[in-house]
C-alpha cells in the first residue's frame, strides 16, 4: 500500500472546537477557549462550535441540570460574541455523525494510545475500575467531533494538546490503513497568555468548573461584586511584582494573575509587568478586579438576558445542528463507503 502523502492545501481551512456543558463556564473557558473562538470567527474563517453533551455524560450528569447547563453555555457563547449566523453553534447529541464516527475510531485507536491519555488518568485517579467505559473512550469521540468536519485547526487550552495529538494519530492511521488521503492532520491552536488559567486558590492547579471550591474560579454567571471579591482574595505571595517576566518563574500565583490581566487586556505578560513592575498586590489586585469586572460583567448581563428565552436558544441550537449535519453527514457516509459498509441505495 502506497504511503499517503498529506497535502494540507487539499483541505479547506475549517475551525472546530468544543466545550463540555458539565458545569457553568469559567474564566478559564472564556480566556482559554471562548474569547479565541470569537477571534477566529471574526477573522472570517469557517467556524464550528459544539457543546459536547455526549462527552459530559462520561461522568454522571443530572438530566435537568445538563439541559440547563447546555442552554446556559449556548447563551454564554452568544453573549461572548459568537454570532450563530456566522459560526455554527450546536449541541453534539443532535448530530448523530459524531457518535457514528466515534465507534469507527474506537476500532482505529489502539488500547496503548488510549491508556497514555493523562486526562483520563487524572479523572479516573485511584478509581479506574469504577469509571465509565465512555470516560476511557472519550478522546476517540473528540477525534470524531473534529474529523467529522475535516477540521484543519482546533483552538483549545493547553490541557487538550494530547487529545489533539491522538486525533492526528487516528487520522493518519485511518488514512494509512485504507490507503486514502481522506482526513486532514489537524493542528491544535494553543496561543495567547491564558492557555492555562490556574485556580485562584492554588496557582499550580488548573481553574476548573469541577473544583469543589467556588473561590477557586470565576464563573461566567458571577456578578461584579463576586468577581471583585474573588480576585481580591486570590492567593498571592508577599513580594511585589518583579521587574521582568522571568521574575515570575517560581511564583505560580503571581504569574497566574499577571497572565489573566494580560489576556483580559489583550496585552502580553511582559507589557503588564512593564506597567506594574514593583507594584504591591494591594495595587495590582484592585486594578485586575476592575478590569475583570469591565470585561466580564457585560457578558454575564447579556447571558442572563438570553436565558429568559429558552425557546429561542433551542431554535438556535436546532438551526446550528442542521447546518452541522449538512457538513458531517456526507463525510461520515463517505467513511462508511471507504471501510466497506453497504449503504443501501434502495432507501
Ligand atoms: P472543558 O471545560 O474541559 O470542556 O474545556 C473547554 C475548553 O476550555 C478547552 O479548550 C479547554 O482547554 C479550555 N479550558 C478549560 N479550562 C481552562 C483553563 N483553566 N485555562 C485555559 N483553558 C481552559
Ligand atoms: N475534551 C474537550 C475538553 O474537555 C472538549 C472537547 C470535546 C473538544 N470535543 C472537542 C475540544 C473537539 C476541541 C475539539 O476541554
Image (cartoon, rainbow, N blue to C red):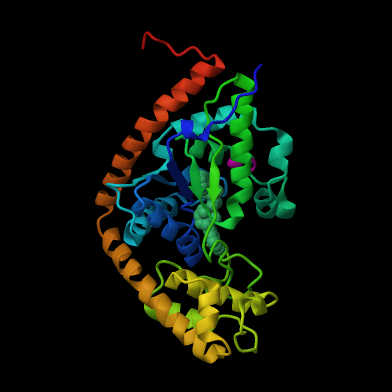
Residue at x 55% of width, y 56% of height:
157
| Residue at the farthest top position | 346
48 in relation to 339, above or below: below
Q: Position of residue 13 (x, y in %)?
A: 43, 40
Residue at x 69% of width, y 50% of height:
118
Bounds of the magenta span? 135-139
Q: Is residue 226 visible?
A: no
Quarter of the figure that contains the N terminus:
top right
Horizontal side, residue 173 vs residue 325: left or right: right
Q: Nearer the viewer, residue 317 or 155?
A: 155
194 in relation to 149, above or below: below
Q: Nearer the viewer, residue 176 or 74?
A: 176
Q: Nearer the viewer, residue 87 or 301?
A: 87
* Residue 297 part of the magenta-drawn span: no
Q: What is the chief secondary structure element of the magenta stretch?
A: helix
Horizontal side, residue 236 vs residue 97: left or right: right
Residue at x 51% of width, y 64% of height:
28
* Residue 138 part of the magenta-drawn span: yes
Locate residue 252: give its quadrant.
bottom right
Q: Nearer the viewer, residue 194 or 121?
A: 194
Quarter of the figure that contains the C terminus:
top left
Residue at x 46% of width, y 86% of height:
286
49 in relation to 339, above or below: below
Locate residue 219: give its quadrant.
bottom left
Q: Is residue 279 visible?
A: yes
Amino acid at each position: 500500500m502506497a504511503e499517503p502523502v498529506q497535502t494540507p492545501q487539499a483541505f479547506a481551512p475549517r475551525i472546530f472546537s468544543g466545550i463540555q456543558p458539565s458545569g457553568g463556564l469559567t474564566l478559564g473557558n472564556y480566556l482559554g477557549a471562548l474569547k479565541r473562538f470569537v477571534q477566529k470567527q471574526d477573522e472570517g474563517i469557517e467556524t464550528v462550535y459544539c457543546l459536547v453533551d455526549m462527552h459530559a455524560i462520561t461522568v454522571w450528569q443530572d438530566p435537568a441540570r445538563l439541559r440547563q447547563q447546555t442552554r446556559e453555555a449556548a447563551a454564554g457563547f452568544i453573549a461572548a460574541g459568537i454570532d450563530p449566523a456566522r459560526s455554527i453553534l450546536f449541541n453534539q447529541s443532535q448530530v448523530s455523525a459524531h457518535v457514528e464516527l466515534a465507534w469507527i475510531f474506537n476500532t482505529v485507536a489502539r488500547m496503548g494510545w488510549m491508556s497514555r491519555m493523562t486526562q483520563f488518568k487524572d479523572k479516573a485517579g485511584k478509581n479506574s475500575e469504577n469509571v465509565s467505559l465512555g470516560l476511557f473512550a472519550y478522546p476517540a469521540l473528540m477525534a470524531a467531533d473534529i474529523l467529522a468536519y475535516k477540521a484543519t485547526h482546533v483552538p483549545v487550552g493547553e490541557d487538550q494538546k494530547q487529545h489533539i495529538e491522538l486525533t492526528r494519530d487516528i487520522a493518519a492511521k485511518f488514512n494509512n490503513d485504507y490507503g486514502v488521503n481522506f482526513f486532514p492532520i489537524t493542528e491544535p491552536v494553543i496561543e495567547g497568555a491564558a492557555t492555562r488559567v490556574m485556580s485562584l486558590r492554588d496557582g499550580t492547579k488548573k481553574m476548573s468548573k469541577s473544583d469543589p471550591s467556588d473561590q477557586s474560579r470565576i464563573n461566567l454567571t458571577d456578578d461584579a461584586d463576586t468577581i471583585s471579591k474573588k480576585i481580591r482574595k486570590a492567593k498571592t505571595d508577599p513580594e511585589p511584582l518583579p521587574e521582568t517576566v522571568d521574575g515570575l518563574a517560581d511564583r505560580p500565583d503571581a504569574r497566574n494573575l499577571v497572565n489573566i490581566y494580560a489576556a483580559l487586556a489583550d496585552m502580553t505578560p511582559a507589557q503588564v509587568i512593564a506597567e506594574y513592575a514593583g507594584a504591591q498586590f494591594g495595587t495590582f489586585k484592585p486594578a485586575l478586579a476592575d478590569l475583570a469586572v469591565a470585561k466580564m460583567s457585560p457578558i454575564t448581563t447579556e447571558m442572563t438576558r438570553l436565558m429568559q428565552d429558552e425557546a429561542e436558544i433551542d431554535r438556535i441550537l436546532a438551526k446550528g445542528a442542521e447546518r452541522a449535519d449538512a457538513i458531517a453527514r456526507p463525510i461520515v457516509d463517505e467513511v462508511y463507503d471507504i471501510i466497506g459498509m453497504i449503504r443501501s441505495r434502495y432507501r
